[in-house]
Amino acid sequence: MRSPREVVADHLEAVRRLDVGGMAADYAPDAVLARGADRHQGRMAIAAYFAQVPERLAGGRVEVEIVAVQGEAVEVRWRIVGGPGDAASGRDHLRVSGGEIIEQTVEFDGEDF
């Protein structure tokens, strides 16, 4: 089974490639993705959110870095480079269990992209 770091690294690689199917593949069927006031519950709802990401980036890219791993908890820093969201940044807090992301909370440093 993949470690929490490996699961998140695979997810981040899919984000870098803008691989929508790959982005959602690492989530548990009943996972929760919370972005500000928005909550996406379940892999299908999370996949629907990720389907919008390439258009929202509009040519920009996401730079990411895993900054901490403690047991099941993984913290990631991210920043948008280029496109309409240029310079948007924040942190993601992910919890991984059984080789799947079960919870992700996104914190923005400023505005959403």
Image (cartoon, rainbow, N blue to C red):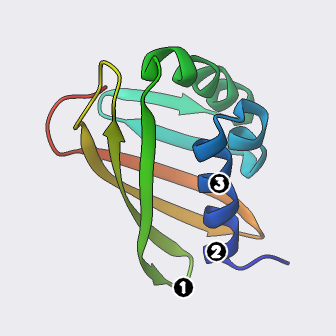
Where residue 16 appears, as percent x and y from the top left, is: 58, 45
Circle 1: residue type: Gly
Residue position for label 1: 71
Residue 38 is tagged as: none
Q: Position of residue 15 (x, y in %)?
A: 60, 43
Disc 2 marks which amino acid? Pro
User: How far from the left and from the top, in percent, is residue 9?
Assistant: 63, 65
Q: Amino acid at mark 3?
A: Glu
Q: Nearer the viewer, residue 66 or 60?
A: 60
Q: Nearer the viewer, mark 2 or mark 1?
A: 2
Task: Give the residue at x 69% y 28%.
Answer: 47
Which residue is at the front of the view, 62 or 109?
62
- Give the number of the mark in front: 3 or 1: 3
In this view, the mark in front (2 or 3): 3
Locate the C terminus by quadrant.
top left
Considering only order in the chain, which callout, 1 or 3, is on the residue closer to the N terminus? 3
Asked if marks 3 and 1 touch (Cβ < 8 Å), the reply is no
Among numbered discs 2 and 3, the one appearing first in the sequence: 2
Q: CA distance from mark 3 to mark 1?
A: 21 Å
Which residue is disc 3 drawn over? 13
Q: Mark 2 and mark 1 in contact? Answer it, CB < 8 Å.
A: yes
Closer to the chain start, of discs 2 and 1, is 2
Give the residue drawn at x 27%, y 49%: 90
Q: What whole-number distance in Å separates the C-alpha atoms at marks 2 and 3?
A: 14 Å
> Residue at the bottom extreme?
71
- How many callouts does the rendering have? 3
Rate crowding at label 2 as few (under 14), some (14 to 19) or many (20 or more) other CA atoms within 10 Å. many
Other residues around mark 1 within 10 Å, as few (<14) / some (14–19) / many (≥20): few
Which element is circle 1 on? loop
Disc 2 marks which residue?
Answer: 4
Instruction: List x then y, in percent, for residue 104.
Output: 49, 51
Q: Secondary structure at mark 2?
A: helix
